Image (tube, rainbow, N blue to C red):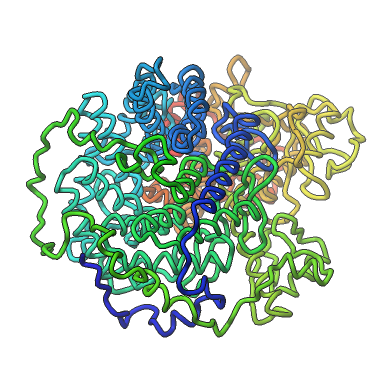
Amino acid sequence: MGCVVEKPRARGLMWTQLVVYLVCQALLGAGHAAMTKEEKSQLRVQVLEMFDHAYGNYMQHAYPADELMPLTCRGRIRGQEPSRGDVDDALGKFSLTLIDTLDTLVVLNRSQEFEDAVRKVINDVNLDNDIVVSVFETNIRVLGGLLGGHSVAIMLKDKGERMLWYNDELLHMAKELGYKLLPAFNTTSGLPYPRVNLKFGVGKPEARTGTETDTCTACAGTLILEFAALSRFTGIAIFEEHARKALDFIWEKRQRSSNLVGVTINIHTGDWVRKDSGVGAGIDSYYEYLLKAYVLLGDDNFLERFNTHYDAIMRYISQPPLLLDVHIHKPMLTARTWMDSLLAFFPGLQVLKGDIRPAIETHEMLYQVIKKHNFLPEAFTTDFRVHWAQHPLRPEFAESTYFLYKATSDPYYLEVGKTIIENLNKYARVPCGFAAVKDVRTGSHEDRMDSFFLAEMFKYLYLLFSEREDLLFDIEDYIFTTEAHLLPLWLSTANHTQVKKNKTSQYTELDDSNFDWSCPNTQILFRNDPLYAQSIREPLKNVVDKNCPRTTSRMDEISGNGNRPPLRARDFMASNPEHLDILKKMGVSLIHLKDGRVQLVQHANQAASSIDAEDGLRFMQEMIELSSQQQKEQQLPPRAVQIVSHPFYGRVVLTAGPAQFGMDLSKNVAGCRGFVAKTEPYSGCSEITNTEVIKGKIALMQRGQCMFAEKARNVQRSGAIGGIVIDDNEGSSSDTAPLFQMAGDGKNTDDITIPMLFLFSKEGNIILDAIREYQEVEVLLSDKAKDRATIFKGKIVPNYIMESNLEGESGEQRSLENDSQKQISKEQSIPQEELVNAKDSEGDSSPISPVDAPHSSDRDHSRNPTDGDLSPEIKQPSNEASQNSVEKSQTPSETPEESKSERWDSKVQPIESILADWKEDIEAFEMMEKDEL
């Protein structure tokens, strides 16, 4: 069988260290009595009731939306809810949950509901939406769901009892979707782009995708089952060919000395971007599909590749019962000290491989973590403490539990399944379904119920407690995809096109003679030793943790001693003295930064107690998650405030932050143009008293004292046509602080119709200084700077704008510009999101241009600093004496008025010449904006 497990290695966590951290409570006593048929039947009925509760609430409150929001009892429609970042890429306005649930209905003997659901999918679902979706998620959930639905539909039709009217409609939809995914494969490597527009494909401007350079290994390597099945069902080979080409490329790019693959790969060059390797997130289903592709398609190549990788996994990553990421080039070095919950699928895959012993060990370790936290946290450390606290109702542990029970027939795994059911009902069930757990330590909920919960969790739990006679069909005739969709094994001989073996692949690096080429007969394996699985689990069970965690939850402690619940990150206010006292108790200190932001630092040893220290850790993790979510929601391009009145005439452009409410300037080509005026009171937080001044103008107000939306409503009522909020933190600048969106107040903001922009103090002072010097200042609020031909179209422009005398500029003017150039070389690169105002160079002015610099995020590795000569300082288009520019000395004979007139009138150049000079910068600016989108 090849089931022998090596003794613990010297590297990583030693066995003696490991067992110290296992939880205190032993799982179950030795020798588990077999569960009776009646007990299994009761649990099966309970699973059906839970499914009906989840599915019924989706159909009642959410359909045809993609997913159910169980806390607010409504559907999640992309674009109508705050963005959750990459998570939303699974949503395509195609009734995701319904499609993902189709074959589950048949497994659970809900044949009538299945027939109704298929009719709804055929009649209601539109796959031609102008929306960007994840290729990976759409493949496994939607394409897999349609194929799984088709598989069980034709099975029911063949039985002659149901679906007699069915005429391959789901297969036709699957083929349509397959063609919509194919443009993603338009790369030299054959690896697909991570996203595709269902209507426009990739690469086109209207597609809004196709500029990505990286994808995860699982994203590119988890296509072969669905695409091959689609080819075998339809006889169209192109789908299987593309999926095979992607797998071939990944195999060729594996690290040859370790035979491991990284997490993220460049889709054009094949270079590994993230070089850590494991069996969890980013790689997991790549390994799964290699083995299952052999089972479904019968191609030895896939098994050889899987065996090669599996040998490397057991040699480097497996530290029984842990599975720790390593570096692909230095596989003896552990890459991190925590594991993610997605690796819970791996014991089930090991069962399919026939390597039972490590599957039992890893599964037992995961169950210990669940016993400690009720659910498997998204990530946990090697000493089983929470690393990421969320649990989105993932089904991978239930999947492995089912496969281990099938392999061992050990009633212990039925008890494990019973625990899963109890925890779901006790900690995740809500009136409108089942809610994801936001924090396994506090039991708080999140308003999401992902489609995979219905597609996988109830399927595996129902099968766990079912006998053959309880099912409508023989489940052994099908293979499960990674989303638990059913594909019939007879596809291996259907529409089969002989595929040539990859001549460039070398298999001589591994002697795989020790690998079995078929799955073991588990009935023979366990017939002579019924306690085999128990003997493997036993060393992991009865060990007392020296730092035994408290058995009562934080919520129990609160209810028992009357203390207030712990402070949540979303409720924290830096100006609240009570909140600051709570932070101090938790060992969290608050540091005020010069740019107005605050920094939080925790020192657990300064907390009042160990409980407070744990609360502090949870608070910090929540704050990090909250900050990350806000950043994702705020990734909109910056806006522009362009001063268009005398004597600026569009030369000065200020970088501004947008608002989450009011007029969307990106959809308004003309923007909003008007004179500016300060509100009274300046905060704009109460009724405006100078309405006669504000009416018909763009209102200036100061940040602070109330919500942004309240300011907007007040100035809108006073007749303002727009609003600019200026930061109250003196000295803040877009050069040094990241831009952000002004958020709403938690209420409906549809009543706000005027555009609102935010300026940092430095940029805001430029407008305020201009008001003091010129009284009447007109600005243009827009999504990007406009060229002067657009701004002054049909208007009379002074001759000192239309004409120019470059020779007449003073030497001092040139020296000032040279000084500014010297300053540029000392500046650090500026984040891409920030726009910087162009310098006033040798009689030429330019609108703002983006400075392209590398991001710290994993999703943008191709950006490089621009070679453009742009100053991060905001400069006015002259050398007039002001707070934002260098003063020009005057001769005794010059009056201030004459000096000012000479300064502005000295720049005379025909507008056509100026525009010609600007053209290159304008084109560069527009091109960079396209790249950013």
Q: Choose top left, top right, bottom left or bottom right for residue 697.
A: top right
Percent x, y of residue 131: 47, 28
Q: In this view, does 928 lie to the left or right of 700?
A: left
Pick the residue in front: 610 or 211. 610
Q: In which quarter of the image is the N terminus?
A: bottom left
Question: Count of labels shown?
Answer: 0
Percent x, y of residue 251: 20, 51
Percent x, y of residue 6: 26, 76
Determine the residue positioned at 40% across, 50% down: 865
Determine the residue positioned at 68% across, 62% down: 598
Determine the residue positioned at 17% across, 33% down: 493
Q: Choose top left, top right, bottom left or bottom right for residue 519.
A: bottom left
Q: Is residue 327 visible from the viewing direction of this image? A: yes
Q: Is residue 227 left or right of residue 575?
A: left
Pick the residue in front: 172 or 763. 172
Q: Is residue 815 visible from the viewing direction of this image? A: no
Q: Choose top left, top right, bottom left or bottom right for residue 617.
A: bottom right
Against 915, residue 660 (above or below) is below
Percent x, y of residue 528: 28, 69
Q: In this view, does 169 lie to the left or right of 57?
A: left
